[in-house]
Image: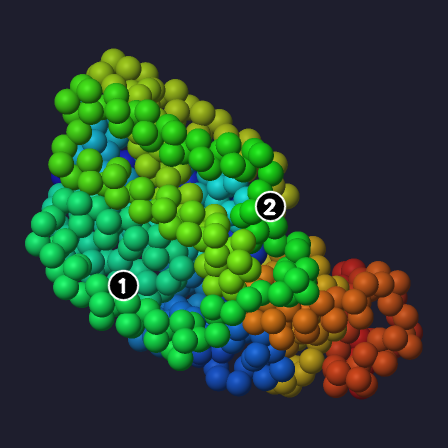
């Protein structure tokens, strides 16, 4: 397919994917972690007080070093790099999806239908993840790389597959791990020489894995997550797969049933090639891994919660989507109709989502609103200053103090709780500080002063009028001095 045709499909895909995700936002949601680690990489010591909280997950990935190197090498701003990487993620997803479709389908219209289906953002039940995000997330970039790897696997480019998955693991090891399991199993099924190589290297690989979970980067994670630690993480329901409600089991296991049913149909029709067979059978390794994690969670092994195994169903969601579109779009006339119907639904949904959101569709920097102006003022305060804010301020205003103000904050309820997955001390710290601020909306000047003195905090940011020295105000947002 020539370049103009590629662009013809890529541009609508990116636009619809962005709009179906509620637009693009800089600094939102999980970027409450992913931005500070990059900012810390570019400006070491930026987060003196919160270093231990950030390091709980930072030490498990080289993502921050990679993005930091890109920013330093290009001289581009962090917001620009994040927007470019988000765009790149979507392009990779689109390109990989198209290439997979070209191997599975017999008509170009079916490939178009698959692209349209992939723009329909949705959650993977009880996994804490979505098929698309409205902000740059390294997991989405890894997903795009992984789909390209699937396409290369179908083309028997196994060496390239290994390189891509290894590169993805440097960005987000947990997300890349599911592609590694899936495609390694597929290669073992399809390629006898790789199967022999895997048998030869099995013992050294097992020794390396044993080192990693004992004295290496995953050291100490084979211990037991006791009841108190699990209680501290109870709001993160997606961690506990043994506690899934019935609908989560039905939806997630339904992917396997759908893939199995359509695979049999294709096989009976003589449409399944050697590599497609290996890809589908290789996905059983993911199902096996899930069963292993079920057992480990029953034993309360720490690593089985930290790897968040519910997210492997993102792989099954993709495979099920590929097969479901084939079932709908087999044959030229049906393929064209299916493509147009799915595309029409995607456009309608994109317009609806865009109209419903109460902010600009594209937001590539911290917004110039009351919160944004308050945080701009915060960036001008001394490095190492400590800030007190509503524990849910990131949800309320769209970005956190760490992201928008680039300053340490007493507690950020949503993200700090999530980081407690990786370190019990962080979970305990977060819970204790959340208790201190359970009355934030009625926080008195006396309590604010006490917290300021006890935790060496410098500023309080709130919408409430409090009898404290006012340092800055923008609209409803007030910043008070605590000392």
Above or below, 483 relative to 262: below
Query: Of all residues shown, which one is farthest toward the top?
Result: 333
For marks 2 and 1 on the same chain, the one whose residue lies earlier in the sequence = 1
Query: Of all residues shown, which one is farthest toward the left?
Result: 193
Label 2 secondary element: helix
Label 1 secondary element: helix
The C terminus lies in quadrant:
bottom right
Residue at 22% over, 23% down: 266
Residue that carries the numbered disc 2 in the rendered image:
243
Query: Answer yes or no: do the residues labelled 2 and 1 have beta carbons within 8 Å?
Result: no
Which residue occupies the foreground of this view, 227 or 351? 227
Across and down, in percent, residue 373 comes to 66, 66
Across and down, in percent, residue 325 comes to 32, 26
Across and down, in percent, residue 461 comes to 75, 69
Residue at 90% over, 70% down: 444
Q: Residue 167 appears in which quarter of the rendering?
A: bottom left
Which residue occupies the foreground of this view, 227 or 372? 227
Q: Is residue 250 left or right of residue 428?
A: left
């Amino acid at each position: 397919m020539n370049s103009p045709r590629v662009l013809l499909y890529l541009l609508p895909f990116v636009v619809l994917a962005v709009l179906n995700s509620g637009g693009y936002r800089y600094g939102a949601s999980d970027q409450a972690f992913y931005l500070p680690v990059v900012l810390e990489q570019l400006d070491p010591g930026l987060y003196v007080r919160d270093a231990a909280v950030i390091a709980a997950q930072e030490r498990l990935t080289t993502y921050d070093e990679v993005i930091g190197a890109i920013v330093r090498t290009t001289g581009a701003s962090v917001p620009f790099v994040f927007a470019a990487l988000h765009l790149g993620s979507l392009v990779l997803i689109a390109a990989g999806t198209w290439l997979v479709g070209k191997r599975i389908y017999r008509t170009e219209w079916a490939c178009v239908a698959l692209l349209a289906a992939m723009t329909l953002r949705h959650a993977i039940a009880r996994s804490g993840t979505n098929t698309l995000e409205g902000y740059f997330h390294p997991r989405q970039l890894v997903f795009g790389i992984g789909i390209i790897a699937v396409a290369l696997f179908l083309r028997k480019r196994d060496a390239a597959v290994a390189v891509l998955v290894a590169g993805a693991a440097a960005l987000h090891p947990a997300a890349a791990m599911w592609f590694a399991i899936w495609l390694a199993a597929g290669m073992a099924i399809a390629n006898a020489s790789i199967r022999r190589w895997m048998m030869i290297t099995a013992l050294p690989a097992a020794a390396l894995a044993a080192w990693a979970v004992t004295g290496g980067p995953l050291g100490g994670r084979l211990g037991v997550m006791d009841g108190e630690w699990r209680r501290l993480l109870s709001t993160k329901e997606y961690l506990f797969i043994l506690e899934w409600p019935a609908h989560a089991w039905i939806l997630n296991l339904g992917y396997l049933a759908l893939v199995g049913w359509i695979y049999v149909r294709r096989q009976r029709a003589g449409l399944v090639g050697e590599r497609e067979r290996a890809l589908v059978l290789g996905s059983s390794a993911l199902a096996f891994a899930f069963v292993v994690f079920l057992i480990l969670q029953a034993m309360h092994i720490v690593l089985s919660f930290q790897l968040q195994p519910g997210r492997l169903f993102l792989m099954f969601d993709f495979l099920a989507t590929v097969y479901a579109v084939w079932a709908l779009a087999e044959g030229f006339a049906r393929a064209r109709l299916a493509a147009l119907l799915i595309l029409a639904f995607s456009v309608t949904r994109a317009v609806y989502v865009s109209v419903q959101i109460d902010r600009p569709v594209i937001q590539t920097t911290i917004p110039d609103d009351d919160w944004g102006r308050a945080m701009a003022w915060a960036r001008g305060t001394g490095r190492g200053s400590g800030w007190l804010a509503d524990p849910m301020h990131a949800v309320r205003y769209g970005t956190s103090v760490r992201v928008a103000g680039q300053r340490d904050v007493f507690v950020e309820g949503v993200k700090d709780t999530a980081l407690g997955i990786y370190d019990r001390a962080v979970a305990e710290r977060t819970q204790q500080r959340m208790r201190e601020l359970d009355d934030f909306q009625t926080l008195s000047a006396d309590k604010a002063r006490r917290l300021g003195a006890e935790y060496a905090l410098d500023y309080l940011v709130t919408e409430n009028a409090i009898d404290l020295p006012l340092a800055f105000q923008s609209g409803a947002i007030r910043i008070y001095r605590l000392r």
